Amino acid sequence: MTTLPAPRPTARFQASQAAPVRLEGITKRFGRNTVVNRVSLDIQPGTLVTLLGPSGCGKTTILRMIAGLETITEGQLSIDGEDVTQLSAAQRDVTMVFQSYALFPHLSVLENVAYGLRVGRHPQPLTAAEEALALVGLGGYGGRAPSQLSGGQQQRVALARALVMKPKVLLFDEPLSNLDAKLRRKMRNEIRAIQQDLGITAVYVTHDQAEALAISDVVVVMSAGNIEQVGSPEDLYRRPANAFVADFIGEANLLQATYDGQQLAFGSVTLPYTQPGAPTGNVRVLVRPEAIAFSHTGLAGRVTSGAYLGATTEYTIDTPAGEVLIAPPSEATVLPNGTDVRLSFRSNGLYILPA
Amino acid sequence: MLGLLAFAFLPWQRSGRAFLAGGDTALELLPAAPWLWVPLLALVASLAAGFLNRAVRAWPALVVGLAGFLVTASFIVFRNQPVDLGALVTALSLLSLTGMALSDTGIIKADRFIAGATLWVGLFLILFVMFPLVKVLRTAFGETGFSLEAFRSVLGSPAFFVLENDTTPRSEGTLALIWTAVGALGGLALSLWRRRPALAVLRNTLLAALGAGVLASLLLGFGALRNSLLLSVSVAAASTALAFAFALLGARSRAPFGPYLFLPLALAGYAVGSLASSTPTTAAYGLLFKGLGVLLGLALAGWLTRRRVTAARLLGVFSLLPIITPPFVIGFALIFLLGRQGLITHSILGLDTDALLGPLGVGIAQTLAFTPIAYLVLVGVVQSLNGTLEEAAVTLGANRWHVLKTVIWPLVRPGLANAFLLTVIESLADFGNPFIMGGSFLATEVYFAVEFNPNEASVYGTVLLALSITAFLVQQAWVGRTNFTTVTGKPTQGGVTPLPPALERSLLVLFTLWVLLVGAVYGSMLFGALVKLWGFNNTFTVEHLLNLSSGSMAVFLNTLKIAAISSVPVLLLSVVIAFLITRQKFFGRGFIELGSLLSFAVPGTVIGIGYVMALNSGFAYLTGTMIILVIAFVFRNMPVGIRSAVANLRQIDPALEEASTTLRASSVTTLLRVVMPLIRPALVSALIFAFVRAMTAISQIIFLISPDHKVVTSEILSMVERGQLGDAAALSALLVFTLAAVIALTNLLVSRLGTPVKVTS
C-alpha cells in the first residue's frame, strides 16, 4: 500500500455556508413495500450526521432521497430553509460520495474533479479542481487515470469531486466499505478532519457501528424504515433507547434483574445503583463487557466457551441472569469450559433499558 | 434558464416557415383549413409562455401542446395529403412541447429531455412498427369490416397446407391418424412404465399423441405452411447441433487444428488446379496446375500446424462470414456446387441432376448460413460456464463424460433452446434462399401474392408473423425462466476442463468437413465471377468484373449511401432507447421495450408488405422514395443496436450516472459526457453492424425498391433470376469483400480506441 501524504487544507478553499437539513415525515414506498416510514430529522448546520443500521433498514434510501436520486413518496425535505422535495438531483445543492466511488473511467483524475464545474460553467474549472485535489492530499495526481490509483486514493478523488462543488450538504454512501480495515480507520479520520475544517454539513451512511461512533456528531440508528434513536455516539453507547440499539452498538449483555430505586439485584447478588427515571421491578439491564470482571464474590456462573484473541480473551458465561459475554485481558492460560467463576459489575457500566 | 428556453423554443418558431420550402405552406392553407389555426396559435402561445415562470406555465403548456399536437396529427391524417417537412416539424415540436410540459407538471417524473425523447420514440414505434403491422392484419382480416373471407380462402387452399394428397395411392390422413395413435400409445406406455402419477400420464399421452400427429402431418403433408415449418425445424435442429459442437471446440479445444487441414487443403488445391486447367489454352498444364495446387494446399496446412492454430481461431473468422454475406448468396453459390453442372454433383459424383437444389438446397443453404449465428449464441454460453463448477464435479469423482452429462449439458440447455428458436425465426423469415432455389414457402408466397392479391399476401404474412412471434415468445419465456449462465463479469477463474480426446477428435473432423464446405461455397463464388459460365465454359474472363461498372456499380454505390445514411439514426435511436429502457422509470417503458423487441421477431417480408401497404398512399406516401428504404433499414436494424447498447449499459455502474446527476448535470449532459464515451467501442460496432446489415438485407427491401432506388441485394437476386450467374457472383464477391474490409477496418479502429475501459469500480 502506498503511503499517502497528509491532507493539507488550504485557506483558499472555502466550502459554501453550512446549511441545515430538515426531513419531515419522509416516507418512501416501492410499490406496496414501505422502505422508509415517516422519518423526521433535523440536521444542524456544520454537523456530521450518520445514518446507521443493518442493511435494508432504509438508510441509503434516505440518503438518496436527500440527493434527489429517489423521489419522495410522502413528506417534505428542506435544505437551508428551502423546500426541495420536488427538485431533481441536478437542481439541488447536494453532492455525494458513492460507495463504488463512481469515478468516470474515461476522464483523468483532474477532469473527474472538474466535471461538475464544467457542467456548471465555472470560469476556472481546472484551477478549482487542482485546489480540491490538494485539499484531499492528491495534489499532482491530476493527470492520472482513476484506475491507476489505489482504492484509498480513488476515495479521495471522489471526495474532492464532491467538495469542489461547494455543496450545501455533502452525502457519503458507505464510502469506506471497499477499503481494508487499516485504511478505513485512516480515511475516516481524514474525512472527519476535512468536514470539521470546512464546517460543512454532512450526512453519512454506514452499517459499521465503530465507524459511526468514531466519525459522527450525531448518530441516527435505524431499523426497518424507522428511526430507533437519535443521539451523540456516547448517548447511544451508554444510554440506548431500546434493546435493538443496545445490541447494534457495540457488544451488549442484556441481563434480567430487579430494581427498586436504590438497588439492582441479579438473583441473590445485589449492588447499589441509582438511575433517575428508570423503571422499577423486573428490568433489563445493559452491561457492556468492559464493565464486568472476574472476582471472588458476585454473580456465579460457569464458562461455556473461551476464545483467545491476543490482547483479550473472550468468554461466554452462563449465569442465572442470562448469558454473559466478557473480554478480560488475556492471562497465561484460557479457562477451560465448565470452570465455575464469579463476576462483579462496575456500576457506571450499567444501564437499565427503558420499559 | 432563458438561454435554455430560447434554445428550446427556436425550432418551433422556425417550423412555421419551414412550410415555405414545400408546396403549399400552412399559411397559404390557412383560409381553406381553419383547423390549422390551432397549431399556429399553440406555437405562438408556447413562445409567449417562455417568458412565464416554469411552474405557472406547466399546465397551460401541457394543454396547448397536447391540443396542438393532436389537432396537427388529425389534420395530417384526415387531409390525407402527403406531408411535407413543415407539417412534420410542426407536429414534432408540438410533441416536444407536450413532453416538456409533462415533465414540468410532474406527470412524468423525469426531466424534459427524457419526457420528450419518450414521446418521440413512442411516436416512431407507432408509425413505423405498429402501423404497418396493423395494416397487414387489417388487410388480412378484410379492409371493410371484420371478415375471415381472405383467411378462409388462403388457409383452405392446397397451396397453403394439405394433408390428403389425391395423386398418391396412400391416404396421408389415415397414416397421420395412425401415427397419432402410435404416439399416444407410446406416451402412455412410457409414463406407465416410469410409474408417473395419473395426471402426468394423461398429459404425457396427450403430448406424445400431439407430437406424433404434428410430426406426421409435417412429414406427409404438402403446402407452404408444412414446407416452412419442416424447413425451419430441421434447419434449426441441424444448425444448433453443429453450432454446439463448434462452440465446444471454440471454447474448449486447445489442440492444433492444422493436421486436420492437410487433406482438405490438398483437395482444395486440386480443385483450384483443375478449374484453372479447364481453361482450354492451359489444358496442357493441367497436371502441373493440379500438382501445384495440392502442394500449395499442403504447404498452407503445414504452416498452420507449425503456428499451432487452433480451431477456435478459425471459428472466429467463420462466425463473421454470415454477417457479411446475405444468406441467399450462399444459396446461390450452392448452385455452383450442387446444380446440374455443379462441382460436387457433376464433376465429382458425375450426376446429371439438380435434385439437390429445391427444398433440400434451401435447407443446406440455410444451415450453412445460420449455424454461425447459433454458434455466436452458444459460444457465449459455453464460455461463461464457470470452470469451478466442473472442477467441483471432478473433485467429487466425476469423469469427463460425467461432467459433460451432468454439469455442462443442464447448464447449456437454455442456451440451446435459445439458439434453436433464433434459428427457427431466421429460417422462417429467410426469403432469398427459397426464392432462388424454388419450392413453396411462406416467405416467398407473400412475395408472389403481393402484386395481384394483397389480401392473400397479408394472410400469408399474418401466418408467418404468428409463427415467428410464437417462437419469439417461447424463447423469451423459456430463456427468461431458466438462465443458469454464470456471467459475473469477472474473468473466469479455474482452469478449463479439456474435452475428452475422442470427442475432441471427432468434433475436429466435423469442423474440417464444415470448413471444406464453406470454403467451397466462397471459392465457387469467386470462380463463378472469374469464368465465362460456370460448368459449361470455365474459361477465365474479366467480362463479369467489367460488367459491374456498367450499371450495378451505381446500384452498389447507391446502396452504400443508403446503408450509411440509415446507420446513423439507428445508432442514435438505439442509444436513446437503451438508455430509456435500462436507466429510466417512466410510464410507457414497457410499451417501448416490447415495441423495440417485437420488431426483432417480425420477419422482414412481413415488415416489407406492411410498409408497402401502409406507406403507399395518403399522408404517409413514401413508396418509391429513398426515404422509405432508409426508414425500413432504421427500424429493421434498431433492435440489434438496442440489444448491444442495453448489454453495454448493463455493465456500467448506474452510480456513474448518478454521480454525474448529483454534480448538476442534466440527463442529456450525462448521456453525452458519461454514457456515450463509456460505450464508444460498442457504439462503433453497432454503427458498422447496422451498416452491414443494411447492405445485406433482402427480405423487407425487395418490396420497397424502385427503378431509381435499387439495392445491391435485389440486383444480385434479379441477376440470378435472369441467369447471369457470373455477374451475380462478381457482384456478390464485391459485396462480401467490401464488407469484410469494412469490418476489418472497424476492428482495427476499435482496438485503437482501446479495449472498453473497465467500468465497474
Image (cartoon, coloured by chain):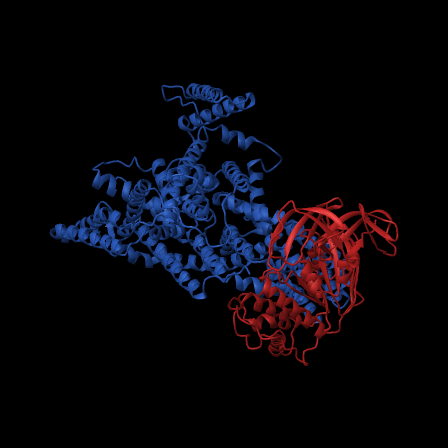
Chain colours: A red, B blue
**The C terminus of chain B: image quadrant:** bottom right
Residue displayed at 57% across by 35% down:
B141
Residue sitting nearer the eye, B479 or B467: B479
Q: Is residue B563 visible?
A: yes
Percent of width and height locating residue B132: 56, 45
Percent of width and height locating residue B310: 32, 51
Residue displayed at 53% across by 62% down:
B678
**How many numbered marks does the figure carry?**
0
Dividing the picture into quarters, in which one does residue B513 lie? Answer: top left
Dividing the picture into quarters, in which one does residue B19 lie? Answer: bottom right
Residue sitting nearer the eye, A60 or A337: A337
For residue A351, side relative to residue B641 (left or right): right
Q: Is residue B454 visible?
A: no
Extreme residue in the bottom direction: A11
- Relative to B610, say whether B72 is above or below: below
Residue sitting nearer the eye, B369 or A37: A37
- Relative to B7, say whether A270 is above or below: above
For residue B233, side relative to residue A133 (left or right): left
**The N terminus of chain B: image quadrant:** bottom right
Residue displayed at 70% across by 65% down:
A215
Extreme residue in the left direction: B284
- Relative to B698, say whether A77 is above or below: below
Residue sitting nearer the eye, A259 or B517: A259
- Relative to B247, say whether B67 is above or below: below
Percent of width and height locating residue A154: 57, 67
Percent of width and height locating residue A28: 74, 52
